[in-house]
Image (spheres, rainbow, N blue to C red):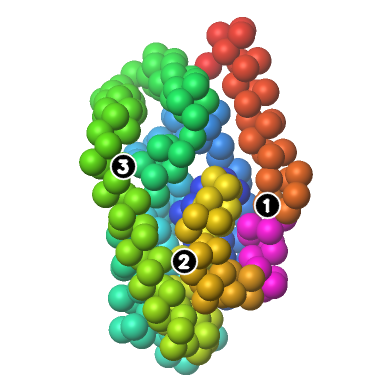
Amino acid sequence: MQLYHHPYSLDSQKVRLVLEEKGIDYTSYHVNPLTGKHMDSSFFRMNPSSKLPVLQNGSHIIYQVMDIIQYIERVTVSLNGGESSISNEVMLWMQQIEDWNPKIFTLSHIPDKYRLFVSKFVRRVAIARMADAPDLASIYHAKLREAYETEDKLMDPDLVKQSEQKLNKLLDEAETQLNETKYIAGEDFTLADSMFIPILSRLTLLNLEKEYIIGRPRLAEYYDMVKHRSSYKIVIGRYFSGWRKYRTLLKTICFLCIRSMFKKY
């Protein structure tokens, strides 16, 4: 299996946690969306959505998170036998977690000057790639429209508030559930936990732990507990411990500044 992802991509973290928990070998390819690598024509031809992650297994190319995770589950059952671990309870939590889109929430907590700088760079990358691959012009145009629409959404306080309210509702329900069970969907670690943990790590990345996690004691205990899992340490911990939290972002900003200076998109 080949996985195209980025360490800070929330959806990529979901899939990687599942792969690590299942013990499935895969080849890792980093694609940094902040530098416009997801706009490369070769990636576009494989994945018209240009979103991360993308899982390729032979002729199978999958780029919807729920589809990828369920495919991994089917492969695991096929290899190891037994029954699927996706119970009705697990599926309900997976769907609820997937229903919250972190994009607006995340961007609304990034200073405007940094967000607009990256957005402008990525748009220029799209225009440059459009000239290189005219047969993909319609897809690149769609991505440009999407970028402008996202900026418009961020100017709408109601949409930003709705995203925050949806997150709070999800975290409140998790807090209630964790008062009854050890993990999100029961006493065992499941696919639902693999999908939920990256949301907590995103709040950590945005320095919002105190506001959204610490005030929920069971959720805070749960987060501390899952940080000790080997899958967490491999997928998230190695990028979020101490100075490592800023290393990838600093390298990305330096890359963007240099490329912008020389107009290399």
The residue positioned 69% from the left and 64% from the top of the image is 233
Q: At numbered mark 2, what does the secondary structure look like: helix, strand or loop?
A: helix
Can you tell which mark lies on residue 240? 1
Amino acid type of the residue tagged 1 in the rendering = Phe
Element type where label 1 sits in the image: helix
Q: Nearer the viewer, residue 29 or 194?
A: 194
* 52 lies above or below 176: above
What are the residue bounds of the magenta stretch? 226-238
Q: Classify mark 3: helix, strand or loop.
A: helix
C-alpha distance separating marks 1 and 3: 26 Å
Left or right of residue 75, residue 98 in this image: left
Q: Is residue 114 left or right of residue 49?
A: right
Which one is in front in this view, the residue at disc 1 or the one at disc 3? 3
Q: Residue at x 68, y 58 (%)?
A: 237
Image-based side of 213 in relation to 63, left or right? right
Percent position of residue 26, x then y: 61, 61
Foreground of the two, 64 or 231: 231
Q: Which residue is mark 3?
A: 160
Counting labels gives 3
Q: Residues within 10 Å of mark 3 (few under 14, many from 20)?
A: some
Question: Would residue 111 be found to the left or right of residue 90 on screen?
Answer: right
Which residue is identified by label 2?
Answer: 196
